[in-house]
Amino acid sequence: MLIAIDAATWIISSRGTMINAKARRKMPLLLYLRLFFTIPEIALNILGTYWSFDDSRRCPDEAIIIVKVAVITNWCLLAFLIIFTYCVFDPLGSVKQEGNLDPSISYRLAQQVWERRCRYLCGCRKVNKINQAIYTDLATIFATFFRNTNTVPTDIAAGLFLLQQRQQYDEKYLLPWKGTQLIRNKLPEPKLMNLSNKDEIDVLQEISYYVAYADAAYGWPLFVLEHFLTAPCKLLPKYRCCSCWRPPRRSGTIIVDDNCCQCHYAGLKLQSQLEDDDILIASYCNDLYELPFYIAYDHNKKKVILAIRGTMSLNDAMTDLLAVPGELQIPGHQKTSGHKGMCESAQVLKEKLIKERLLERAFKDHPDYGFIVVGHSLGAGVAAIISILLKPDYPTLKCFAYSPPGGLVSLELSKYAHDFITSVVTGSDLVTRVSLQNMEDLRNKIIFTIRTSRVAKYKVFLAGCCCCSSCMSEDRNDDNETNAEAGITNDDNDVIIDVRKEEKESILDHANDDHEEDESFFDGLNVNTLVSTKLYLPGRIVHVVKDTQSEQRHGNEYHAYWSNPENFNIVKIENTMISDHMLASTLTALNNITEQIPS
């Protein structure tokens, strides 16, 4: 019976398109029927658990093992089902269908739902004023961002694939045409770095040199990931077992909140090739707005290094998500703001540096040394902001931010930091393009894409898995019709472009006409103040890109470009947008470029 219900569910759910749900109108009945049969299924699973784990039963071992595996698998599937249902279940669904609920009440209910989810996610954390404020801010962001979307996770996945196809089509057929002058006027052209220019060579060599310090801030987890087979043998000699009860190191290095064997510190030394005498402090305190960091000496370059760790915990993730603009007061500058979570983290770190006089002690022993601040991802964002805060007190300060978040500082601050902050972006890195305004634009485009697609969702996934080359033919025909309506035609391989309406106007307005009242409410409530101030990458930007043509000829080859913050205002859907964010990809690309520098 269950097999028949599941088969019927699969067949009916594959009918229609993502938006046309009439062909799936019997799905609620099947789901309720499946839910009813879940009760006896759980009862049988309990009986199977008792029977298989009861030692008094005298049954063949082979049969017992098979039953145990089946029982454990069923419990795992049941747990996954409960967690998945909780994650995607929208308790406001029935309220939305009534259609007569005041939009302000609907919005506040959505805020309450998201705030409760944030609390459940951090169930082990005690609620205080700081946590409560963060939960409220996050709930506001999520309630605003997901307003009136009416989609499920699989819709988003299919929309991302369809949007990727659209972007690739545009790059292949639309961008080569002369009409892209309109686009070029909006987006400044990147400039290829000259490997025969001494100043630009020095920049590339500095970037390649200091990335190791950003890598070392992650401690042993990243070291194990990068040296999976040899990591245990390399780490064991560096461990200091039972350090909790042993006297401090003779070097005087301050190690805070590392584990008993000081595993993070061991990974730091291996990654950075630093000795105990070179490290002033290694702090692994990780709380809301408090990131692990270390301060060390580079005697070869005569620099004091401040390295800040990136995202590795739930606390860090909450800081990442708190992406609304926050006030950042810089003397002599107005309308300066930055990523709120990272601004708070930078302020906390600055206060700690001042309170414990860490930088003062570092420069007391070496007053002639320069000052370098580095970080990756979240650490890069905090490194950039604290560099802006510390620059007046440390004129020699330079910051190298590897893959910082795209929505980090206002445009004025980005230009102000041009002389002392260098942001490094690798390929199609997603994080460097993530900001609230970019994600709003991505959300609108995904909604527009899935609502205009006439292809069944399973066909989209088949095409994405390269299992069916003809699955998207129907959608391509629909794209041709859409292009014809928009003024895009093909004649002798010449493409004539009339910029589509969705590039000029909000796509959501075309795709979501049924919620005009809700949209007018949000405009009246001014919820869009979350993205009223656009945030950008900080300082000057070095964009490292793989040469796809050289890859076909003689392996991977990378090129470095001077780019602009405005060039990262669009999220590019690429297969490598996650892997390009990893430090391993950045290290590979930078090593490749430095090898191309003439000796």
Image (cartoon, rainbow, N blue to C red):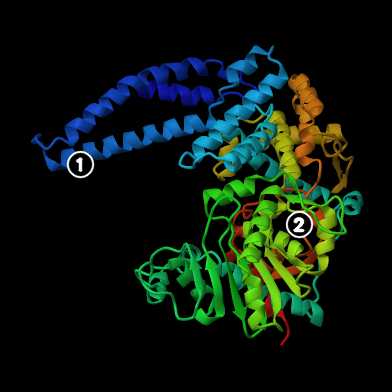
Amino acid type of the residue that numbered disc 1 sits on in the rendered structure: Ile
Could you say which quadrant of the image residue 554 lies in?
Answer: bottom right
85 left or right of 176 in image: left
Among numbered discs 2 and 1, the one appearing first in the sequence: 1
Residue at 88 percent of width and 36 percent of height = 487
Give the residue pinned by disc 2: 537
Residue at 68 percent of width and 69 percent of height = 373
181 left or right of 338 in image: right
Which element type, helix, strand or loop, lies under badge 1?
A: helix
- Give the label, 2 or 1, closer to the camera: 2
Q: How many labels were placed on the picture?
A: 2
Give the residue pinned by disc 1: 65
Amino acid type of the residue that numbered disc 2 sits on in the rendered structure: Leu
User: Callout 2 environment at 10 Å: few (<14), some (14 to 19), or many (20+)?
Assistant: many
Residue 492 visible to the viewer? no
Name the outermost residue toward the bottom: 599
x and y, in percent, of residue 567 in the image: 80, 55
